[in-house]
Image (spheres, coloured by chain):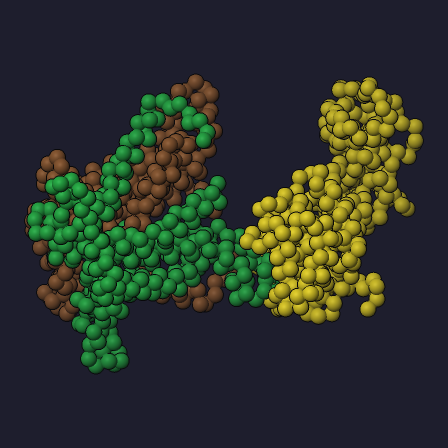
Amino acid sequence: MSEKQKDFIRIRGVSKLFGDFVAVDNVNLDIGRGELFSILGGSGCGKSTLLRIMAGFETPTAGTIEIDGVDITHLPPYERPVNMMFQSYAIFPHMTVEDNIAYGLRKDRVARPEVTARVDDVINLVKLGEFRKRKPEQLSGGQRQRVALARALIKRPKVLLLDEPLAALDKKLREHTQFELMAIQDQLGVTFIVVTHDQEEAMTLSSRIAVMEKGCFLQVGEPKEIYEYPTSRFVADFIGTINMFEGTVTQLGDETIIVNSAEAGTNLHALGDHAVEVGQHVCIAVRPEKIFISRDEPENADDIKVRGVVDDLGYFGNLSLYRVRLSSGKVIQVSSQNRQRSAKRFVEWEDEIWVSWRPRSAVVLRD
Amino acid sequence: MAAVKQRDWWERVTIAVPYLWLLVFFLLPFAIILKISLADPVIAQPPFTPTFDEQGSLSITADNFLFLLTDKLYAVTYLKSIVMATAATILCLALGFPMAFGIARSAPSTRGVLLLLIILPFWISFLLRVYAWMGLLNNYGVINNMLIWLGVIDQPVRLLYTDFAIFIGLTYSYLPFMVLPLYATLERMDIDLIEAAQDLGASRTEAFWDVTWPLARAGVIAGCLLVFIPAMGEYVVPYLLGGPESLLIGRVLFDEFFVNRDWPLASAVTIMLLLLLVAPIVFMQRNQAREIDAQQ
Amino acid sequence: MKKQSRLIISILVFGYAFLYIPLISVVFYSFNDSKLATVWGGFSTRWYGELFRNEQILDALFLSLRIAASSATLATIFGTMAGLILVRFGRFRGRALFSGMITSPLVMPEVITGLSLLLLFVSMQQLFGWPGQRGFATITIAHTTFAMAYVAVIVRSRLTAMDESLEEAAMDLGCRPLRVVFDITLPLIAPAMISGWLLAFTLSLDDLVIASFVSGPGSSTLPMYIFSKVKLGVTPDINALASLIILVVSVTLLIAWIVTRKTQPRASS
């Protein structure tokens, strides 16, 4: 067993049908030991079904799942080395915090002194010491979340499944808890699989992300890879904000391609790391923060430069957002860091400005 | 005590009307029963001695209660009523819990129909539902005919006018009272809880006893009391389905009053029955109040 | 949705069979030509015809309907008042006693309610000569008393579920408290009042024991008439009557169910 066992979890050809509806469509995936892996997608994309298949609440229509070399596809939930943290937390309302947490060990007939010791450990880990005798209704949302986490962790599962672990918390608490969750995962080295619809949450938490849509994985990769090099419009659009320019390939260079785009009103250069042909319809995508805004024409000759008018602007403290109407009529988003403190904005509504970006900041999307 | 807020005239009227009605037609009658239970029976109109005699001095007697407590027949009757009501409650629970569970877990489209089918008998005359069993349990009734046709028996078995018939009749009549409150609690229960228990290593059976059962407690209590309390005083079922020897309190009370015209003794029987039921009734109201709090 | 276990399904089937086989057998035998109710003598509808020529039954039915309508109306008025008091009036002197009195009739065995009310009526008659004749009035009073408890429970749960801010909004807009009750509260709890009335009506039609206690000679309600006949055993004309009642109740309930399903689609999961 190597430290970096890449196929700790092996999902092979897993499908799930509910009647005619295909919830999960022939999914293949390897997850390494100790990873914090996120499955990201909108509601109804099949991510929760996949999680429930791993937990053993649903049987896949086809395919197998192995954990640490053992096929668990047909094991009932109570015999799997997997535990789950439910979105609703599912804390037993008639038991105290302590009894909730100890439940899993008691079901395994673990000796009493060991139960006590392990409950102590895990309660300290999630910092619930003073609440151990309380009933769930006396806890806040954040505390309930910790109980659910502690209860799922105490059996030292090989894999911990987390269904929207932070969705029920308010924004401030969510950010705080995110880092705590990462710290605990790091400390215990347990493999975490998180299901979430929140792309920001997935970006910060995960070592890798799978973006799911209509029962399929569209892209699997590290957060940075998914953000900077999306392979499809869906992924590009789903993760963060992105400006897309429709166009046709007119020229292929060594490293770059040139795309004629009516929406941009100019020829666009981009790094051509995709196999494209002249005349093919593609889309050039640029993130708002990769675009610069200036009053005067930018000097760098390689940059793509387009003229526009400030349609709307918003101040968000750390950054400013601009909606710029290009001469073609297309409206794009641009964001810039507010590095300097000043009461005066350097552009105003209806100002004529230039937007520009480096060719290598843009992504070519074929589908 | 906190100052009671000054009320408008219409608020006073709204409180006063139902309040007075209940005082006169609900509470006062119990005082009268108590009074009569302490009198002696006489052959007169009304057939009991006044609480105050001609000299105006108090004339009460505990004879009726002493008689009830010492007479073996009454002890047996009370005991039998308790046994019957308990047995019917247990059978209702054994049948009603899985039914309520099944209804609560069924698809939403069928759930409505299943519930309607539970409620429907409740709207059909109680008397007629008990009557229906007379036709089934009769010596020449459906069940006997069926058993003879199947060759299980060759002579009709006496089913009607037995304790067994009372037991079936009580269970049949009060089953909906068990299913409905159980359904209400089971339907509210989060299915995630059961899955969480299984995820933590509990088998289906263990998950049921660890999670489902304790969380359904309020419904179980409500259902059991809704069956037990009225079953204790049931009159129609023992009269129509039970034999002449199957004496339950409800029937004894009725006969004592109308047939023997011993009003004081009938009143004493009532007071004893009430005493037996006070604990469950109070328990019931507490349980209900908690349920209402829990919903708010 | 999870698949049901086989055990649960078989218990469900058994339970529903248990509930419905007696009713079905009554309907079946109501078409029996034989005078012996349990021996099949061919198909006939003659018992239905006899039913409508039986004046005793018709009289009893008419009395029962009159009592049911009046007691249901009174019970709805008092029960609604009681529900309002308990949910919206806050504290008042004797509230605990009141809430005890309003819920007790729900679980009180009928023999106790019946006997206690009869003794009350007898004492009242001795003291000031009313009620001289026991019948319509006494049964109506008795039925009102226990049915108002049911109405109060229904109204109360509807009121607790209702958003109090609606009433506060009306008051904020200048409505005086009594007007609020008539303009806002009552219209909103009207469905609960209607189902309360229907329940009270059915309970009254259904009651045998209490009516037997508090009625006098000469006034028999329908259940009392039926009881006097079935005491002696199964009779074919009662089978026919029972079948008619089952039909009426089923059709009414089915219509009510369809209507409520149409008017509040997917109100709650």
Residue at the outermost right position = A300
Q: Quadrant of residue A321?
A: top right
Residue A351 in view of the camera: yes
Chain given the colour green: B
Which quadrant: the N terminus of chain B? top left
**Does residue A246 appear in this view?**
no
Relative to residue A352, is residue C243 depicted above or below? Answer: below
Left or right: B183 as drawn, with respect to B252: right
What is the drawing colour of chain A?
yellow
**Residue B248 drawn at (x, y percent):** 24, 62
In front of the other: A182 or C247: A182
Q: Residue at x 24, y 50 (%)?
A: C112
Front residue of B22/C143: it is: B22
Up-down relation of residue C122 to residue C42 (above or below) = above
The image shows residue C126 at horizontal and vertical percentages of 12, 39
Horizontal side of B202 relative to C162 (left or right) equals right
In this figure, what is the number of numbered marks? 0
User: Taking B93 as reference, is C255 left or right?
Assistant: left
Q: Residue at x 22, y 69 (%)?
A: B162
Q: Is residue C142 left or right of residue A105?
A: left
Which residue is depicted at the point 18% across and 55% down?
B265
What color does chain C have in the rendering? brown
Query: Residue B262, position in %: x, y?
Result: 14, 54
The correct choice, above or below, for B138 with respect to A220 in the image is below
Judging depth in this view, the residue of C163 and B289 nearest the camera is B289
Residue C66's x, y, as percent? 16, 40
Q: Residue at x 20, y 40 (%)?
A: C141
The residue nearer to you, when weighing A82 against B96, is B96
